[in-house]
């Protein structure tokens, strides 16, 4: 029997993951067995990785590396294959979201007994990743015929790298991962804005974008360090728990850290007064990149702002709630007033108007986040629903602008007058996109999205903010309807129709050109999505009544 006990002890010691225990008094066999069992029950420091959960951003990042290497070996006439490879990779990343739609996965979790993970796939993550990857997919479609004058390999690598960071951010659940994802999404965007070599406007736009973003990142990192110093953790859920019980000595430090962190993310959303980089950056960047920044870049900023405000800092809702409400009112007002003042004959006035429009739309997107401080987290669903609508129609508007720029490089608002005479389908699509942004029929999805945002403000008791939003919606109608009406007017300088009995030669029809297939595909996809959502708005509006976290 003693021999059997000794053999059992030896087996336990041999299979124990920890070191052998010191024999306890009362017998070497029993002491060794107890020590080995205790070591076996100790938590492992090795983390398991859920590869399916991290597949969408990982595949996008790997595709970026493959494109960069393939660029070294492909001859110039075949560089176009890199674009189609990028398109395929983004489509595959979107397909990988299908098995994740249940939103119940987490990985990179702590093994010390605390229930906190660095990467979580919930409903919020899935929806924002679909928006980001879908926006990047349409950006690639817009870019396929624009990269002939650009370094193709670098362009596709930078675009995919930025998209991978943007897809990582909504799944991040600690401040370190959030900051890394934000910078992975932002740093390639600086280079993309200034990628047009020899273009002074592009270089100036990239420099302004870079300097502004660096300052905002520095402020945000200072805030993150203060939050970590006052709570001792970087995980968002743990921060939320510990901020409820901060010692009085660290209370000021914690409040300062919360404020500085929110300021950094407010810059990424282009909220006033951190919006000054937007118009010049959109005008100087290649048009597809301006479209990318207006949708994917904005999604990145709002995702980060939602995570830090609602998930990490709910105990300071009485501080950031009123601040975000004021920012929302200021942002939508500044954006709409500046858009109204745009001169139609100014070079690139169409892109500049879309830039100011995106600033105003950022104000609407901020409303439900501010409302979440006064009611429940479900108000965030209104922001998500509005962001989905905005992404579809704004990318469509930029696609139509890219089509017009083929024949009118100046891209003035006056260049769109009479577009229906030469491009009837493009004019109808652009008119539909503008009406969606304005919130008017037949853009039903735009109307419903604005109503949900308005309702979020009213339900939270922010009646004054609802009034400001209503006034701004009326202001925005002026420039949206003015642009829409110009699409169907007689072109400037066109002669009057000639009567058939005058004997004069009939006026020649305006010259047309064959639009690139990828560009027309992008317009068709966004128009079809807008029409589908207008016919079945509940597909998007259901997020307003679902807890996304």
Image: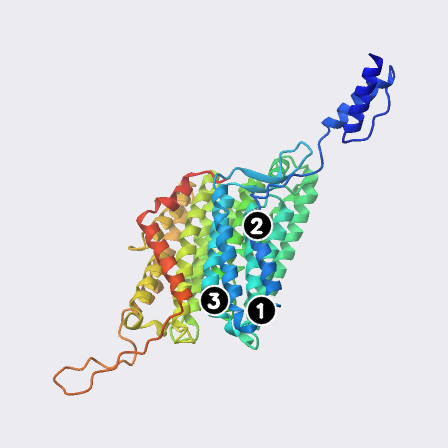
Q: Is residue 523 above or below residue 266?
A: below
For mark 1, give the secondary structure. Answer: loop
Earlier sequence position, callout 2 versus callout 1: 1
Neighbor class of circle 1 (other Cα within 10 Å; few <14, some 14-19, many 20+) is some
Q: Quadrant of residue 51?
A: top right
Contact (Cβ within 8 Å) of mark 2 with mark 3: no
Towards the viewer: 212 or 173: 173
**Pointer 3: what residue?**
144
500 sits to left or right of 476: left
Q: Kindly report which numbered mark, 2 or 3, lies closer to the viewer in this rendering.
A: 3
Quarter of the picture containing the N terminus is: top right
Cα separation, mark 2 vs mark 3, equals: 25 Å
Q: Nearer the viewer, mark 1 or mark 3?
A: 1
**Percent from the top left, x then y, of residue 352?**
44, 68
Residue at the location (39% across, 42% down)?
542
Residue placed under numbered mark 2 in the picture: 168
Which label number is shown at residue 74?
Answer: 1
Looking at the picture, does residue 342 appear above or below residue 470?
below
Distance in Å between CA atoms under marks 1 and 3: 16 Å
Question: Quick one: label 2 or label 3, which is nearer the N terminus?
Answer: 3
x, y percent for residue 220:
62, 53
Q: Is residue 522 above or below residue 320?
A: below
> As drawn, which residue projects farthest toward the top?
1
88 sits left or right of 12 in the view: left
Question: In this image, 406 relative to 191: left or right?
Answer: left
Q: How is the image coloured?
A: rainbow
Please indicate whether residue 322 sits to the left or right of residue 487 in the image: right
Query: Within 10 angstroms of label 2, few (less than 14), some, or many (20 or more) residues?
Result: many
Within 10 angstroms of label 3, few (less than 14), some, or many (20 or more) residues?
many
Of the image marks 1 and 3, the number of the one nearer the N terminus: 1
Residue 317 occupies which quadrant of the picture?
top right
Residue at the spot 40% in from the left edge and 61% down from the top edge: 522
């Amino acid at each position: 029997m003693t021999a059997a006990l000794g053999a059992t002890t030896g087996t336990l010691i041999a299979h124990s993951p920890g070191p052998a225990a010191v024999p306890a008094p009362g017998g070497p066999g029993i002491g060794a067995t107890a020590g080995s069992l205790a070591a076996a029950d100790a938590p492992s420091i090795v983390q398991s990785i859920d590869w399916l959960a991290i597949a969408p951003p990982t595949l996008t990042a790997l595709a970026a590396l493959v494109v960069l290497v393939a660029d070294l070996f492909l001859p110039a006439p075949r560089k176009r294959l890199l674009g189609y490879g990028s398109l395929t990779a983004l489509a595959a990343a979107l397909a990988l979201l299908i098995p994740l739609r249940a939103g119940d996965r987490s990985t990179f979790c702590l093994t010390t007994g605390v229930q906190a993970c660095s990467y979580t796939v919930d409903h919020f993550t899935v929806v924002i990743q679909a928006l980001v990857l879908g926006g990047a997919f349409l950006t690639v479609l817009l870019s396929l015929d624009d990269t002939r004058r650009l370094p193709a390999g670098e362009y596709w690598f930078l675009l995919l790298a930025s998209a991978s960071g943007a897809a990582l951010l909504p799944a991040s659940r600690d401040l370190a991962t959030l900051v890394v994802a934000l910078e992975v999404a932002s740093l390639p965007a600086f280079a993309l804005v200034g990628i047009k070599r020899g273009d002074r406007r592009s270089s100036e736009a990239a420099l302004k974008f870079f300097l502004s973003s660096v300052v905002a990142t520095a402020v945000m990192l200072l805030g993150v360090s203060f939050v970590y110093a006052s709570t001792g953790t970087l995980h968002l859920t743990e921060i939320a728990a510990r901020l409820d019980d901060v010692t009085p000595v660290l209370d000021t430090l914690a409040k300062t850290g919360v404020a500085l962190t929110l300021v950094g993310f407010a810059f990424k959303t282009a909220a006033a007064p951190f919006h000054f980089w937007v118009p010049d950056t959109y005008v100087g960047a290649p048009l597809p990149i301006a479209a990318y920044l207006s949708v994917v870049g904005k999604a990145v900023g709002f995702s980060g702002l939602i995570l830090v405000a609602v998930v990490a800092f709910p105990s300071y809702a009485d501080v950031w709630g009123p601040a975000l409400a004021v920012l929302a009112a200021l942002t939508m007002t500044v954006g709409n007033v500046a858009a109204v003042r745009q001169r139609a004959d100014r070079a690139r006035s169409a892109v500049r108007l879309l830039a100011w429009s995106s600033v105003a739309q950022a104000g609407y997107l901020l409303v439900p986040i501010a409302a979440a401080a006064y009611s429940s987290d479900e108000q965030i669903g209104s922001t998500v629903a509005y962001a989905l609508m905005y992404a579809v129609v704004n990318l469509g508007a930029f696609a139509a602008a890219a089509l017009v720029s083929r024949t009118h490089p100046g891209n003035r608002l006056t260049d769109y007058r009479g577009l229906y005479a030469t491009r009837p389908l493009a004019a109808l699509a652009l008119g539909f996109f503008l009406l969606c942004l304005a919130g008017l029929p037949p853009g039903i999805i735009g109307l419903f999205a604005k109503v949900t945002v308005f309702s979020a403000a009213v339900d939270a008791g922010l009646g004054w903010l609802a009034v400001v939003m209503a006034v701004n919606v009326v202001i925005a109608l002026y420039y949206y309807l003015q642009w829409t009406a110009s699409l169907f007017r007689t072109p400037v300088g066109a002669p009057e129709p000639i009567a058939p009995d005058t004997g004069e030669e009939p006026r020649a029809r305006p010259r047309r050109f064959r639009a690139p297939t990828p560009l027309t595909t992008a317009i068709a996809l966004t128009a079809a999505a807008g029409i589908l959502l207008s016919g079945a708005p509940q597909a998007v509006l259901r997020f307003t009544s679902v807890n996304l976290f």
